[in-house]
Amino acid sequence: MNIINFPPNITTTEKAANEVSRLLIVDDDIVLARSLQQLTELVGYQVKVCNRGVEALALLALESFDLLLLDLVMPGMDGHAVIDNVRRDFPQIPIIVVTATGTVSEAAQSLEKGVYDFIRKPYEPAELLRTIENALAKSQLERIQAVTSSKLDHYENLNHYLVDSSPDIIYTLDEKGRFTFVNKRVFSLLGYLVDELIGEHYSMLVYGEDIDAAKYAFRAQSSFERATYNVELRLRCQSDREEYRYFDISFIPILNTAHVDHIGEGREFLPLKGSYGVARDITERKKVEYAMAYQAHHDMLTGLPNRTLFNDRLEISIAHARRNHHRLAVLFLDLDRFKWVNDTLGHIYGDELLKNVASRLKSCLREGDTLARIGGDEFTIILPEVPNKDDVPMVARKILATLEQAFVLDNREINISASIGVAIFPDHGDTIDALTKSADIAMYHVKWKGKNGFMQYDSSMDSIFHQKMSIESDLRKAIENNELELYFQPQVDVNTLKVVGLEALTRWHHEDRGWIPPAEFIPLAEEAGLISMLTYWLIKQVTIQHHRMQKAGFGDISIAVNVSPESVLKHDFVSNFLLSLRSENIANEAIEIEITENIIMQDMENSILKLNELSRQGVKIAIDDFGTGYSSLAYLQKLPMHSIKLDQTFVHNIQFIGQELPIVSAIIGIAKGFNLKMIAEGVETTEQMQVLKSLGCSVMQGYLFSKPLPMSGVLAMLRSQDRLFA
Ligand code: C2E
Ligand code: CA
Ligand code: CA
């Protein structure tokens, strides 16, 4: 790399205009020399005289002179030798020969050597002075020219240096778009040699997808007058045509009138017409921008598009469908048991499961479809074109089927399912929001209908949806404001006709809608993530009420509480539960937990763990709705149960269908065999009671004895117990 000093050090060779010129006269004839000196001093020159050629050269080496007046014939070194020396060592000093002897050929010879003029003695003073003046003027002019051209040389070097060492690619194109110049930076940035590009069309450098943008910019530039243009393009690397870097390119057109001076020999690169441009490498900045944009548009866990990108894609799909008059589908998918996995197995399992679900879902879709994760366990799908009515159900069924196979995480099998809502453009909405909302509403209906399935949106779903949604928010308030109530249904020993236990049942009196049955709001609470809150409330209330019973002298009657699986399987359920009992000073044995058979079957391992923990602490456990699930004797052995509750349906069917009897009697047999307490639920008639009693079941619960009552009612009943069921 050539280093150039700046500013250029060239002013020293210039001579100020008002400075007096210095002459040197060289002549062996002293008299003549003196008269010449007098003449020239008279007009203002500074003059020195010497009589020998050698002396003259020595003086020239010491001092600076502007002109030499030289005699040819001298002893020792003659005038010719002086001329040769001066031309060689001081080429800028003009020489005028003043001689008496010179022949024409001598004169010609001296002029050839670069002598300014040849004057014969005796000279005409005026002519001589004019000649001196002219010689000085010419030499001055030459000096100025020399300075100027050295300045130009300098600037040209500087230009080349700056151009080649620029961090940017600098280029010119001719009017057809072919490279006429490009600096060396193109090699370090893209790997091309300068010579490879000269004469080539710019498009050979432009990355395929950006060709149109490049052409557009190039055309715009050729059709408008002078201005700067800007375009961002990807330019291909020489080594790999698919590799590229990003450039921010600024360029200006070069017009016919462009005045291009002194570009330097062999470097005539500016065309008369075309463009001049600077391409700045912005690859690093772009990488950061892309990383940020990726993060803004993707879910980091699964790598799927997030809600923002989903919305973008849906907008494009809608516009496309509208233009082409076709239908598109939005699927809203919510995993059914995800919260449970997260709560009971932990977030690491939850995350792993989501990743696995994402990849299974992807395998059900085609390339043009979009799968996005827009929330914890919520996925959305765009099917941009659905020509046939059956297309969407087919995809939905495929998804449900692929989720049906158990996921194996860390050697553990996990079963989940999904609820899918479907909305079709334009039937169920023609905007992003409308379609997504319709699909969401349809998804909720699948949840309410028992999950694991799909439904297409229908306008009749709206009112139910809004009702449920408002109930949901009311329920939250009700729990927070302690507006729910606990009722208690007695469990009666039919042999003694005494109340041996109570089942706590939650009641919600909604100020506008009246009584809302638990069968309706408990699933809602589960869906809305309110169930833990409800369970804590429930346990608190139960302990308070049991305390009341103790004070009334009925502390030996236990209370059973229904706990939803979501709560029971939570890691801190057992400790929280025991803590609540302790804070009200309730014996662990006083509270029984009812858990449905189906729940246990869903996650045996965890259930056994939790129930064992409770049982070890003295808490009693009842299996609710016994006989409705896949009752297996194997699990009865593993579970620390105290009682089983015969499901109401068996009880109700006793009097109608004789065939139920063997089943009921078998269940009662099982309870006996395992030494479990048996409670028959929903006993409404004395007939039912008598049949059950004859089969060996003694504890019963049902309207025949009492409906669920508030604690005050229960206490009143217990006080008059002796007279009650007699
Ligand atoms: P379950 O545990 O099977 O409760 C028994 C249900 O049968 C209660 O309905 C009760 O009122 C009703 N019942 C009692 N005797 C008779 C009868 O002779 N005939 C008929 N037809 N029904 C009778 P309820 O209170 O509406 O509760 C429904 C379900 O809601 C309960 O079923 C239970 O699974 C759930 N549940 C109630 N309270 C809570 C609670 O606090 N937490 C949780 N997690 N679930 C609750
Ligand atoms: Ca129950
Ligand atoms: Ca039950």
Image (cartoon, rainbow, N blue to C red):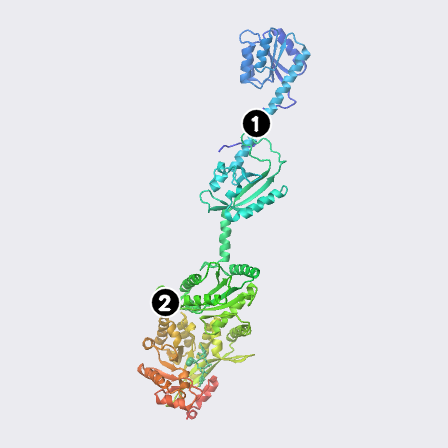
Few, some or many C-alpha atoms within 10 Å of disc 1 (few <14, some 14-19, many ≥20)?
Answer: some
Q: Secondary structure at mark 2?
A: strand
List x then y, in percent, for residue 381.
49, 63
Few, some or many C-alpha atoms within 10 Å of disc 2 (few <14, some 14-19, many ≥20)?
Answer: few
Q: Nearer the viewer, residue 418 or 176?
A: 176
Q: How far apart are the two marked residues, 2 and 1, measured between alpha carbons?
A: 86 Å
List x then y, in percent, for residue 345.
39, 67
Q: Please state the total of marks drawn on the protein image.
A: 2
Q: Which residue is mark 2?
A: 413
Q: Secondary structure at mark 1?
A: helix
Q: Name the mark nearer the viewer: 2 or 1.
A: 2
Q: Is residue 642 left or right of residue 229?
A: left
List x then y, in percent, for residue 388.
50, 65
Q: Which residue is mark 1?
A: 150
Quadrant location, ligand no. 3: bottom left
Identify the amino acid type marked 1: Ser
Q: Would you say the beta carbon of the disc 2 residue lies within 8 angstroms of ligand 1?
A: no
**Residue shown at 55%/61% (left/top)?**
321
Where is 246 relative to 410, above or below?
above
Q: Nearer the viewer, residue 524 or 594?
A: 524
Q: Quadrant of residue 427?
A: bottom right
Where is 542 relative to 35, above or below?
below
**Residue shown at 67%/11% (left/top)?**
125
Q: Nearer the viewer, residue 313 or 666?
A: 313
Q: Is residue 383 left or right of residue 32?
A: left
Please say whether residue 71 is visible from this viewpoint: no
List x then y, in percent, for residue 240.
45, 45
Dot placed on the residue nearer the N-terminal end, 2 or 1: 1
Identify the amino acid type marked 2: Glu
Where is 129 relative to 431, above or below?
above
